[in-house]
Amino acid sequence: MQRRTFGKVVGAAALGLALPARATTPASEHLVQHDLKLDGDARLARRALLLVPRDAPADTPLSLLVLLHGLGETGNEQLGIHAWGDRYGLVTSYDRLRAAPIARTMPKLRYLTDAHLAQLNASLVQRPFGPVALVCPVTPNPYKPGPSDRVIERYGDWLEKTLLPAVRERVNVESVGLDGCSLGGFVGIELFLRKPELFATFGGVQSAFSAPAALRYAERLAETISRVGPRPVRLGTSSEDPYRNANEVMSKRLHELGVPNVLSVLPGPHNQPWLREIGTLDMLLWHQRQLAR
């Protein structure tokens, strides 16, 4: 992935909104926050926000979803750990799912269509959303300090040897999923290819990579999944996402290679309001159901 690719992400993610120096994940009726300050290289990661279901008994096994953030929050630990909760709508999406039926939060922005809304609510009546723990670590820009391959390798080792053990000290983790947004989707696929044994599910939301890279990733994913066993895969994008074509190319090629996957293309741009209204909610529901299996 080339540096210039990220330029599109920065402008699209901000959408003219001022980026505050600090961020805070909103309080939730259903989630308890833990700010994990861990050992690690300050240039990579040493901090994460853990969100644990409030009503889950301490000894109950829980699924865990690891969420990697986008480029706009790299370089600042506070922004990084709160990106999903503060900007991408993770906590509000979780609360909406636990308090179904789902309703629109942005009526003037039709990112959530009538048909999709009806489908979601019918599905939640049949199978309510269950508890899942969430951890949002700082995600590095792999080109800083670079080289990118080495940065991702070191970040994967930190996630495996420092972050996940720290989470398991607080949560009885049964299975682990991985997802990322934009730059985080790119980092996520690189991590999954290196350490697939860690993850039971894999996905990306508006993942930032090119169509040629998507073809190469599809081949490597097929080889990896053939080696380690089936893994549910989801590719989430939107109608105006600059990376829509690349995600569609990857999905098609995975199917050709015999790898089942879910491709979600919903109305909307590559921005944070779309994430808060439906992008994060759809992603969260999919992982919770797959991990629960």
Image (tube, rainbow, N blue to C red):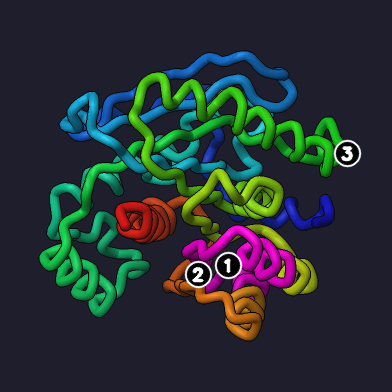
Numbered badge on residue 238: 2
- Cβ atoms under marks 1 and 2 closer than 8 Å: yes
> What's the amino acid at mark 1?
Asp
Residue at the location (16% across, 62% down)?
Answer: 127
Residue at the location (52% across, 56% down)?
Answer: 202
Q: Quadrant of residue 110?
A: bottom left
Q: Which residues are magenta?
A: 218-247
Up/down of 107 relative to 14, above or below: below
User: Mark 3 sits on what residue?
Assistant: 147
Q: Secondary structure at mark 2?
A: strand
Measure how far apart labels 1 and 3 are at the Cα level. 28 Å
User: Mark 1 sits on what residue?
Assistant: 241
> What's the amino acid at mark 2?
Ser
Relative horizontal placement of residue 60, taking residue 14 as reference (left or right) = left
Q: Secondary structure at mark 3?
A: loop
Label 2: how many Cα within 10 Å (few below 14, some 14–19, many 20+): many
